[in-house]
Image (spheres, coloured by chain):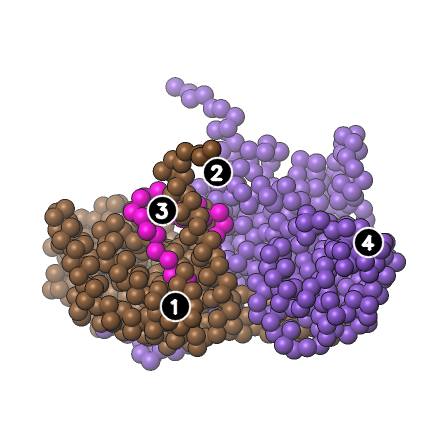
Chain colours: A brown, B purple
């Protein structure tokens, strides 16, 4: 007798099958030699190059549908692949292929008094779920980073980029198979049913080891709220720059301008500027003038408004806001301790910078603030795996478990202990 | 107008308050100098010494109640504190006090081409929830390890050890306060309401960073099933020892005997023995005779039964069973590959050992098995933080995120990046 299958049961079965295939591929991949993994990614790059026309045609279909649906220009821009972006995507893939293999690295080694030699070596994590939205290139970035680190990945793209991502995925799989590795190492969820995301967030019966959301705040918030497995993500990058009384004036201007205005929309952009009350005329005024000259809106507390009448009043909400736009909130503080207290209260614990020459102010800033990244005399926009030398990142994590800050290849690994004995028994 | 408070709401409010106090204490503790933390633990040890009579009296009350409730001898043994155990507990506390401080360790340092110097330094995790059962000494062990690593801890003991743990907790808090650190760094949930555990497993509104269950399988299973925050734990220690064709005979006997019979109830005890089919008469027979002579029950496959008629048949269930008792299941395999396949199918991925002289067999065993701890020519009973030189452990984790294997002080930390610049801006 046939059982009736509900759509939910069919979806669960589909996702369960994807999980099993990912686990099997992860087992093969964990044992694959470094050279074979690198070869596979280079083969994938060649396959993607050969598939360029096909992928761009698929992208044109997605773009036409998005335009017809009235999507905004910023959305269309994220979705669009042109020849320049396509080649940049391939260049990134080849760079990841050539990075040092993170699996098998010797992380620590020591010898016990009884002669046991203990080594801690890096292993893959297992299976990684990546949930993303409109940018098709995430399939390549995330697929390559997880594969290079010996993990199988399950990709779930946005419904608006279905054709683009499917075409990209076919090329990636062809590359892996050409190198003799399982195509299931990079799987794409073949349905736009939102319930598939729910299945992934529940971990596919223990198959998924970690979830990485790549997209806007509503996606990240849903993932953080619903996931029953670990998540590498940051919900907000509410970053601060503090200009101390001891700061070099020109450096304060240049670094703050870069921290806010280089790209106001990135997560490492400074949103709130804190300034020591002793350097308002000398430091803050030229900083605000430089920001305003670049088109930045200034929202200040009362002292700032008095100093710089073009500033609009900052409300309590401003201290909580990641603008992702050319707007900055500015507050005057009594000393570095007050700056630290403000940051500990309002920060998303992503990235904070201090501009100072006084080593004691820097010491306190570094010791007392619990954010993933703290900088002295440098722009908060350095909060990026590439800038750390990680050769790419799958995201930045504000969690404190396992990965914190930029999540590169090393953060996509776990470890195991290998112990060499000569017949030792435990007393 | 007064709102009616349900018991549930009162409990949630109580637990929420505990979470807030823990978070505040963690913030102080994260900044506390290493010497002050060590002093506090020594003061706690002195306070515990002074409170010995009080704690032992409290323990007698718990014991009397447990006896009256008809608890089994093994349970009463876990609950009981006598003078010898009390002094051993204090000795352990003082050892933890004197361990190197794990906070602030320099984990990595490198310089970027642009001159930025990036350091990764260890930080506390934050707030750790420890849920334990009848052993009162867990309050001291877990409290000291979490405190030493700069974390605040919320302890939830079993209802049977209420009086003992409360008396121990009072002494610990007195010690912390004597050293000028917040007593809230080590809190004890003051209710035996089981719903309090549920509140902890939901993380107390994001306050608890990680949960550590210390107790039997039903506790660990509940915690792993219900927790919405990361968990450091192993549900089972289904460990294997494999005797290769190339093994030294005497070593195989001695190591296997220790791996099973030193303490059959610990998580690192071997449960299943795998033996290469070429060494049945030479190696397996003396191993089985030695095990049987120590009172171990042998359950074997058909080949084992033919070799050693006293063996009872092993069923499929045996390969899945962590006996925690003097029983061993024994299987004959064709080669190291078959041993690896059996382990990957049945192991809990805790600890496995190979006895072999052939380096290629060892290489495959180490490369292809994904367990937390792999040993060559040594007993699986070395799976212990103390034996690793960690100076104590809060447990052993079979998870792959953050901590794997013994969880000591280092595994109870996270990290942050400290970046030194000279005015760098990002191009």
Residue drawn at point x = 58 percent, y = 49 percent: B212
- Mark 2–mark 4 distance (CA, rounded to whole Å): 56 Å
Q: Distance between the residues labelled 3 and 1?
A: 27 Å
The quarter of the picture where the N terminus of chain B appears is top left
Looking at the rendering, the stretch of residues picked out in magenta corresponds to: A185-209
Disc 4 designates what residue? B311
For label 2, the residue is B16
Whether residues under marks 3 and 2 lie with C-beta atoms below 8 angstroms apart, the answer is: no
Q: Position of residue B300 (x, y in %)?
A: 76, 55
- Cα–Cα span, label 3 and label 4: 50 Å
Find out whether residue B390 is within the magenta segment.
Answer: no
| Residue of label 1 | A177
Looking at the picture, tell me which residue is in the foreground, B284 or A198: B284
Q: Of tags 2 and 1, which is closer to the observer?
A: 1
Q: Earlier in the sequence, mark 3 or mark 1?
A: 1
Residue at the disc numbered 3: A197
**Which circle, 2 or 4, is nearer the viewer?**
4
């Amino acid at each position: 007798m046939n059982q009736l299958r509900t759509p939910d049961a069919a979806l669960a079965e589909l996702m369960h099958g994807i999980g099993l295939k990912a686990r099997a591929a992860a087992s093969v991949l964990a044992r694959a030699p470094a050279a074979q993994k690198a070869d596979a990614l280079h083969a994938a790059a060649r396959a993607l190059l050969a598939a360029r026309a096909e992928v761009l045609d698929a992208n044109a279909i997605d773009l036409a549908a998005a335009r017809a649906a009235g999507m905004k220009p910023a959305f269309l821009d994220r979705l669009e692949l042109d020849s320049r972006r396509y080649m940049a995507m391939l260049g990134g893939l080849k760079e990841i292929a050539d990075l040092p293999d993170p699996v098998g690295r010797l992380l620590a080694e020591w010898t016990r008094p009884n002669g046991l030699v203990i080594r801690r070596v890096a292993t893959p994590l297992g299976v990684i779920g990546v949930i993303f939205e409109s940018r098709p290139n995430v399939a390549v970035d995330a697929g390559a980073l997880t594969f290079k680190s010996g993990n199988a990945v399950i990709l779930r793209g946005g419904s608006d980029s279905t054709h683009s991502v499917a075409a990209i995925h076919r090329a990636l799989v062809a590359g892996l198979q050409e190198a003799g590795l399982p195509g299931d190492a990079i799987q794409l969820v073949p349905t736009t049913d939102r319930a598939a995301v729910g299945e992934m967030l529940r971990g596919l019966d223990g198959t998924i080891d970690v979830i990485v959301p790549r997209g806007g705040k509503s996606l990240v918030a849903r993932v953080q709220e619903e996931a029953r497995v670990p998540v590498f993500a940051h919900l907000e990058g509410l970053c601060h720059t503090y200009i101390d009384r001891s700061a070099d004036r020109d450096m304060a201007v240049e670094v703050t301008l870069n921290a806010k205005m280089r790209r106001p929309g990135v997560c490492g952009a400074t949103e709130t500027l804190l300034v020591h009350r002793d350097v308002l005329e000398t430091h803050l005024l030229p900083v605000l003038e430089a920001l305003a000259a670049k088109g930045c809106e200034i929202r200040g507390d009362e002292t700032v408004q008095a100093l710089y009448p073009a500033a609009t009043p900052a409300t309590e909400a401003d201290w909580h806001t990641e603008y992702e736009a050319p707007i900055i909130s500015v507050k005057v503080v009594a000393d570095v301790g007050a700056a630290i207290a403000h940051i500990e209260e309002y920060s998303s614990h992503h990235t904070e910078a201090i501009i100072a020459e006084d080593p004691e102010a820097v010491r306190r800033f570094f010791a007392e603030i619990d954010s993933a990244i703290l900088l002295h005399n440098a722009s908060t926009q350095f909060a990026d795996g590439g800038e750390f030398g990680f050769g790419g990142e799958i995201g930045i994590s504000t969690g404190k478990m396992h990965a914190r800050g930029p999540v590169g290849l090393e953060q996509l690994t776990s470890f195991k202990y290998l112990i060499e004995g000569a017949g030792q028994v435990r007393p």
